[in-house]
Amino acid sequence: AHLARIEAVDEKVHAFLHVDREGALAQARAVDEKRERGEKLGPLAGVPLALKDIFTTEGVPTTVGSKILEGWIPPYDATVTQRLKAADVVILGKTNMDEFAMGSSTENSAYGPTGNPWDLTKIPGGSGGGSSAALASFQAPLAIGTDTGGSIRQPAAVTGTVGVKPTYGAVSRYGMVAFSSSLDQGGPCARTVLDAALLHEVIAGHDPLDSTSIDEPVPAVVEAARNGSVEGMRVGVVKQFRGEGYQAGVIQRFDESVALLKELGAEIVELECPSFDLALSAYYLIAPSECSSNLARFDGLRYGLRTGDDGTHSAEEVTSLTREAGFGPEVKRRIMLGTYALSSGYYDAYYGSAQKVRTLIKQDFDKAFEQVDVIVSPTTPTTAFAIGERADDPMAMYLADLCTIPTNLAGNAAMSLPCGLAPEDNLPVGLQIIAPVMKDDRLYKVGAAVE
Ligand code: GLN
């Protein structure tokens, strides 16, 4: 049924870069056979899922939305892919994304943009716009995203779906193509809080193949999602998460959510987190710095595209020509920014200062969580903007992640879930819930109470 739905609508939505029809049917058949043999089935047996094209899939193309990996067929599965298969999930295909997960609209994909199913002239968020659009257009009930600065939560917010960035280190990064390794985190996307929790438990947990993976039990997120409540909880509202640049309808729905939390028995605490104002600037030094280092491996020799290999060019020239042809403008911008910020003489002023700001942000969160159990905010300052509207203005594009970035810098957990439509444009608004490190269960407890 989901493959038929994809066939019917994805020409318009363009959520998928690759539909693995044969693979999906084979996985589904394998589940049926297991059932017939009376074998024990995985926890999500037979449930179809859309996988962001940043996770390697053995034998199935993985492009990361880039021309530089066009035609590359990974010889191995990411840990997330392996765990999905072990849970008997049916992987429908790979979803569209901004090239190397750099963007907030999916317009930076080398394979063309994705439409927002609520209004196809609007962006579905990014970088994981393909995954969120697949959910919102009922092409898949579950999806996987990755969140470096907001790429799970912002797409969830603008498509009226649920997206969770787990605590950094909770979901393995093995086989997840690296953008900014100290920030990147995979996580679940779904249409309900409980569905997200069921998927969270399948993909999370320690992995010896990822040196930053946390070796602790996964928080009981499914139990929390089944027992939604905010009774007696202290919920923080941060002053820095409103003001200039926020759409009136977004603030209106957010204020209503705060009123609902209060009505359901939460105590609302006003907080100040002054360093949050610096988060965006720090992020746009740290993320490009790490990206410039991570993307050095795309040298035209090891994977995917190779340009100029005609016997007339040196190996160095082949690398240059391949990178020139294979990377899009935003990726090149980030590599240049990062290389500059890391260069000798500038390192302390840029990268070093950004790391200090990162510590200040973490301290703001630590102080806040001495007073409250969770923090809430709008997920994004505005609803979905038009395709093309911010394409030539990187600064305007970067502002889409104003509320999501502090969490990535500090490493704690956050969720976005729908909280109504903005009255001025009838487009979805996201409510963000933020919890301390490894208290991901609180996101689900609160999310299920207000859903
Ligand atoms: N939009 C942010 C960026 O462009 C975040 C992307 C992400 O989380 N992958 O870097």
Image (cartoon, rainbow, N blue to C red):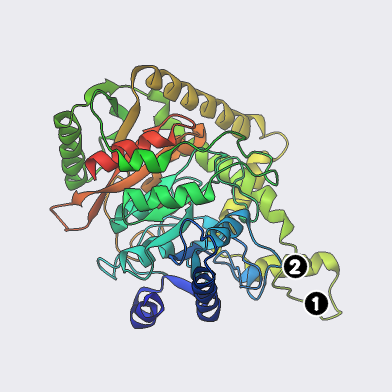
Measure the alpha-carbon separation of dots 2 and 1: 9 Å
Residue drawn 36% across the image and 71% down it:
139
Is residue 391 visible in the rendered image? The answer is no
Q: Amino acid at mark 1?
A: Asp
Classed neighbour count for the residue bearing mark 1: other residues with Cα under 10 Å, few (<14), some (14–19), many (≥20): some
Residue nearest the observer in this picture, 438 or 61 = 438
> In the picture, which quadrant includes the N terminus?
bottom left
Disc nearer the start of the sequence (2/1)? 2
Label 2, residues with CA under 10 Å away: few <14, some 14-19, many ≥20: many
Residue 195 percent location from the top left of the image: 36, 53
**Residue 444, picture quadrant:** top left
Residue denoted by label 1: 309
Q: Residue 364 placed where, x, y %?
A: 43, 22
Task: Tell me the quarter of the picture where residue 2 sits.
Answer: bottom left
Tell me what residue is drawn at x 25 percent, y 65 percent: 118
Numbered disc 2: secondary structure: loop
Q: Position of residue 45 (x, y in %)?
A: 47, 63
Contact between marks 2 and 1 (CB within 8 A): the answer is: yes
